[in-house]
Amino acid sequence: MNRKLILSLFTHLALVFGLAACASATPTPAPQAQPATANAPASGNGSTESSGDPSALPPAGVAEQDLARTDAQGAVEFTVTPLSLTAPDETLEFDVSMDTHSVDLSWDLAAQSVLKTDTGLEVKGLSWPVGSGHHYEGKLTFPAKTADGEALLEGAKTLTLIIRDTDAAERMFVWELSR
């Protein structure tokens, strides 16, 4: 009888641990896109990330805040960091990193992205090095001026990058600019 009790206990424990392992592996639905700002980090997991280098200072044209924005909607996590907001030449560049274990990342982000300001100006993406894999990183570029020749960042207080149709209907990344 002691043997049956031990076997029964072992079976119940195996079942409980098996269910717990399966339950934690089940993905939860991702929240809808929320713009990421200094007070409201990027959507998905609610966190912002920095370069990890405490001596790295944000550019003068950007408010004191972490520059990296993260969005973890769907099965892909995006991390976007602006690279040239302080003194843009012809283009504005963003480092974009995508991580997944189940989605094809061969999107043309230049064609699926728009950069907007609170002043109403907007530009479409110029270039993105299309590639694939489970972990992909590249530079997404935009023109620094509109088609009419207006400087995109002139007088702007916020800059919003919108990326569409990337295992989520829309991902928004917002930076506050200081002028």
Image (cartoon, rainbow, N blue to C red):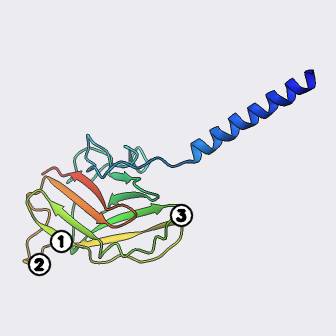
Q: Residue at x 32, y 62 (%)?
A: 169
Q: Which mark is residue 56?
A: none
Q: Please name which of the two marks, 2 or 3, marks the residue nearer to the observer.
A: 3
Residue 132, percent across and down?
A: 50, 74
Q: Are marks 2 and 1 in contact (CB under 8 Å)?
A: yes
Quadrant position of the N terminus in the picture: top right
SS at circle 2: loop
Q: Which mark is residue 123?
A: 1
Residue 105, percent across and down?
A: 46, 70
Foreground residue among 16 and 55? 16
Q: Is residue 137 left or right of residue 46?
A: right
Q: Is residue 83 left or right of residue 135?
A: left
Snapshot quadrant of residue 91: bottom left
Foreground residue among 11 and 145? 11
**Tag 3 or tag 2, which sits nearer the N-term?**
3
Identify the residue position indicated by label 2 in the image.
147
Task: Give how far apart the Cα atoms at labels 1 and 3 are.
Answer: 31 Å
Which amino acid type corresponds to the residue marked 1 in the rendered image? Val
Identify the residue position indicated by label 3 in the image.
102
Q: Are marks 1 and 3 in contact (CB under 8 Å)?
A: no
Q: Residue at x 41, y 43 (%)?
A: 54
Q: Are marks 2 and 3 in contact (CB under 8 Å)?
A: no
Q: Is residue 135 above or below residue 65?
A: below
Tally of numbered discs = 3
Task: Give how far apart the Cα atoms at labels 2 and 1 are.
Answer: 8 Å
